[in-house]
Image: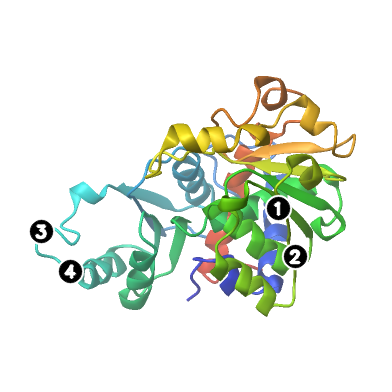
Amino acid sequence: MKHFINLKDISATDLRKIILNAKKRKQKRKNLNVLDADKDSPLKGKLLIQMFEKSSLRTRLSFYLAIKQLGGGALTLRPDELHLAKGGESLADTAKVLSTYGNGFMLRTDNDEKLEEFKKYINIPVINGLSPSSHPTQVLSDIFTVEEIKRKPISKLNISWIGDCNNVLNSLIAASVKFSFNLTVGCPKKYKPKKFVLDWVKKNKKKIYIFNDARKAVKNADVIFADKVVSLNDKVNKTKKIKDFKNFKINSKLMSFAKKDVIFLHCLPRGSEVTDEVFLGKQSKVWQQALNRIYVQKSILLYCFGKLR
């Protein structure tokens, strides 16, 4: 049984296998409808249980379609529908019940420790659909998208992140170590990546480059990543935070400091951190990026279910 909780804990070989499998499965679906199952239906009869403690659009839809296209089914639960830690049932007991009914469990949570607790007591694979410290399914899909568009391994590309140092960036940093690509980060001084993230990079004898000037961060970039500066559940002075990032807004002028064929990616939802001109422009590949979540999620499920070939 394999979990998919953090990119740091998965071998580079397995991550590459997931991407290659996703590429093959996407190619084979060209003439199929959205709800048509893949011809091999490798997860026929399997049930994925999903639980969302935080709002979700792309993760919810992509996992639902992923398991359906693999021949299985999905059941989505809300925490307020369960006894989870509130109605007298422990998380351990909930995990054992989920193991009895389902074949896999995908959790989108506001608590990293909860993922580890489920992992401890559950007898089926756990997938991290987003947590405060990481968003591994998003970032692995993003790597798939980058290589699909650029038609070369990401190890040969320069990747730039502009904006807040959040859970998505944490996973992108982990990916930069696993896939050996150059990563630069542009952010205000007091918003740099957490020490535990940087310590892990150093421990693995890798390096990321952090700039407090957005123009320097995007120099020679093949890809520019961004995310919403103020997340929905940010417990900060939102007005001040937006002001702190005013020099890191992604506009056409900033894009001009990167390579001419640079592409723009954003995991969505978006805020004021990017102009419409860039977000809706030719360099933006955000819709392709969102769609690809389905294909990579499928291969992640196969990895977790021991069906990845």
Q: Amino acid at mark 3?
A: Gly
Name the residue tied to disc 4: 90
Name the residue tied to disc 1: 143
Label 2 Cα crowd, 10 Å radius (few <14 / some 14-19 / many 20+): some
Instruction: Give the mark nearer the N terminus: 3 vs 2.
Output: 3
Residue 87: mark in rendering? 3
Q: Please report contact status of discs 2 and 1: CB closer than 8 Å, yes or no.
A: yes
Above or below, comparing residue 17 to residue 54 in the picture: below
Q: Position of residue 276 (x, y in %)?
A: 65, 21
Question: In 3D space, how far apart are the residues under numbered discs 4 and 2 (Cα atoms)?
Answer: 39 Å
Answer with left or right where residue 168 lies relative to residue 281.
left
Name the residue tied to disc 2: 179
Instruction: Give the mark nearer the N terminus: 4 vs 2.
Output: 4
Question: In 3D space, how far apart are the residues under numbered discs 3 and 1 (Cα atoms)?
Answer: 41 Å
Q: Secondary structure at mark 4?
A: loop
Q: Secondary structure at mark 1?
A: helix
- Asked whether residue 120 is in view, the answer is yes
Q: Amino acid at mark 1?
A: Ile
Q: Amino acid at mark 2?
A: Phe
